[in-house]
Image (cartoon, rainbow, N blue to C red):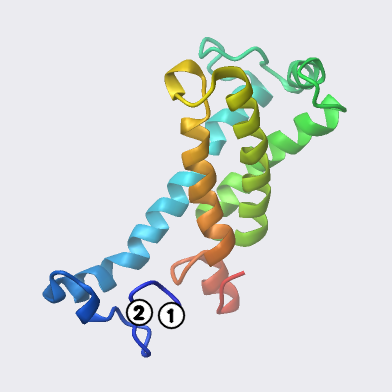
Amino acid sequence: AGRICAGPDGMTDPTSLIFPSLGPLYQALAPWAEVLLRAVVGLALVPHGLRNTFGMWPSTGVRSHNLVELAQQLDNDGYRPGKLWAWAISLTQLIGGPLLALGLFTRPAALATVIFLVVSNYERWRVGGYFWNKTGLEYTLMWTVAALYFLVHGGGAISADHLLIGREF
């Protein structure tokens, strides 16, 4: 319910579709597309957390390979206190990411992710402008909008929140 093109019964209004006969297919696939997007958005954070917190994949272009180095980098970039922000970033990526992927405490996990990504967007714009291949914000902006979707909509019908408490959190 509450989705664009939904009729009073919560189902897709076939009169709003160019190919009304595809309405049932769209309706059947929508929750699964939402699960796939939520899983990708949440799990995409994990390798970044593993890299910055535990030094995995050291040759991938990062300046920090553990929490101490990340805190120093953040202090140097003007995000003080760096130690606080290093922990916040790591927890968002390593705990918030999997929670978002599972749809467990979806909105709080999405809120932390959106805040993290908004700051990342600012930094990417400051450093590289728009284009991703110039270290710009294009890539992080896309992820921010995807995470914002789950902050607004919750985890969906196929989520741990829905399974455990019967509704979206």
Q: Position of residue 25 (x, y in %)?
A: 20, 70
> Which sits in the foreground, 116 or 61?
116
Q: Residue at x 75, y 23 (%)?
A: 67
Q: Is residue 5 left or right of residue 74?
A: left
Q: Which residue is mark 1?
A: 1
Q: Residue at x 33, y 75 (%)?
A: 5
- Return the residue found at the far bottom: 8
Q: Residue at x 36, y 90 (%)?
A: 9
**Residue 28 picture quarter:** bottom left
Q: Give amino acid for label 2.
A: Ala
Q: Give amino acid for label 1.
A: Ala
Q: Is residue 169 left or right of residue 91?
A: left
Q: Could you tell me which quadrant the N terminus lies in?
A: bottom left
In the rendered view, would you say 76 is above or below 159? above
> Which sits in the foreground, 112 or 7?
7
Judged by depth in the image, the label closer to the viewer, 2 or 1, is: 2
Q: Could you tell me which quadrant the C terminus lies in?
A: bottom right
Q: Which mark identifies residue 32?
A: none
Residue 139 visible? The answer is yes
Q: Which residue is mark 2?
A: 6
Q: Are marks 2 and 1 in contact (CB under 8 Å)?
A: yes
Q: Secondary structure at mark 1?
A: loop
Q: Residue at x 65, y 26 (%)?
A: 123
Residue 104 visible? The answer is no
> Which sits in the foreground, 31 or 142?
142
Q: Secondary structure at mark 2?
A: loop
- Return the residue found at the far right: 81
In the rendered view, would you say 59 is above or below 68? above
Q: Earlier in the sequence, mark 2 or mark 1?
A: 1
Q: Position of residue 7 (x, y in %)?
A: 34, 85
CA separation, marks 2 and 1?
7 Å
